[in-house]
């Protein structure tokens, strides 16, 4: 069998023309739409991947923002606690100072009162001593004069 014989040439040309027509028809009606569908699918997949990347980046940014806000809230809470502790300590020191001053004032008042009582007692004792002395003297002097 000789494939390149003169009798087989027209059938080869016919087969080639038929193949060419079939290729053109398939290109126009089958391959073209199929390629477009594949390109659309590829574009949609690329768009979805890009969207997923953007969403991942947005999620990472939001996570970083969340951490920053949380850290700021913790720092604010710690500052508030420290401020409250400082204020409480200052108030406690003020209360202690006022209590000491009040205590010292009471002690000074008590000491002054004790001193006044001591003075009154000494004056009373001195008065009684003088009274007793004068009674003794009066009793002794009339007896000696006689």
Image (tube, rainbow, N blue to C red):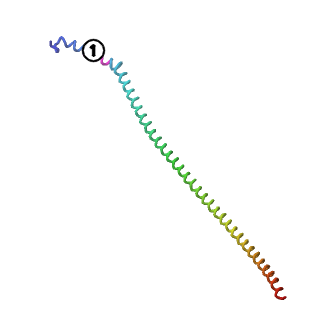
Residue drawn at point x = 22 percent, y = 12 percent: 11
**Residue carrying label 1:** 18
Residue drawn at point x = 79 percent, y = 81 percent: 136
Q: Nearer the viewer, residue 71 or 110?
A: 110
**Image coords of residue 72 (percent x, y):** 51, 48
**Image quarter hosting the N terminus:** top left
**Image coords of residue 17 (percent x, y):** 26, 15
Write down the region rendered in magenta: 16-24
**Image coords of residue 37 (percent x, y):** 38, 24
Task: Based on the picture, tell me whether residue 53 belongs to the magenta stretch.
Answer: no
**Image coords of residue 28 (percent x, y):** 35, 19
User: Given the current orientation, which residue lies at the most extreme top position?
Assistant: 7
Label 1 Cα crowd, 10 Å radius (few <14 / some 14-19 / many 20+): few
Mark 1 lies on a secondary structure that is: helix
Q: In the picture, residue 4 is in which quadrant?
A: top left
Task: Based on the picture, tell me whether residue 22 belongs to the magenta stretch.
Answer: yes
Relative to 99, 119 lies left or right: right
User: Given the current orientation, which residue lies at the most extreme left position?
Assistant: 1
Q: Nearer the viewer, residue 2 or 88?
A: 88
Q: Is residue 109 above or below residue 143?
A: above
Relative to 120, 67 lies left or right: left
Q: In the picture, residue 115 is in which quadrant?
A: bottom right
Q: In the picture, residue 143 is in which quadrant?
A: bottom right
Residue drawn at point x = 78 percent, y = 77 percent: 128
Q: Nearer the viewer, residue 128 or 72?
A: 128
**Image quarter hosting the C terminus:** bottom right
Marker count (numbered): 1
Residue drawn at point x = 55 percent, y = 51 percent: 81
- Most prominent secondary structure in the magenta stretch? helix
Q: Is residue 52 above or below residue 146?
A: above
């Amino acid at each position: 069998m000789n494939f390149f014989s003169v009798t087989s040439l027209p059938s080869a040309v016919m087969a080639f023309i038929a193949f060419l027509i079939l290729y053109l028809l398939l290109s126009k009606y089958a391959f073209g739409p199929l390629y477009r569908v594949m390109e659309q699918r590829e574009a949609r997949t690329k768009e979805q991947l890009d969207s997923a990347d953007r969403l991942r980046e947005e999620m990472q940014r939001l996570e970083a923002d969340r951490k920053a806000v949380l850290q700021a809230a913790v720092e604010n809470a710690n500052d508030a606690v420290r401020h409250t502790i400082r204020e409480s300590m200052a108030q406690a020191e003020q209360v202690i100072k006022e209590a000491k001053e009040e205590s010292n004032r009471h002690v000074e008042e008590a000491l002054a009162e004790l001193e006044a009582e001591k003075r009154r007692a000494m004056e009373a004792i001195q008065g009684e001593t003088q009274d007793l002395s004068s009674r003794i003297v009066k009793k002794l002097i009339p007896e000696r004069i006689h």
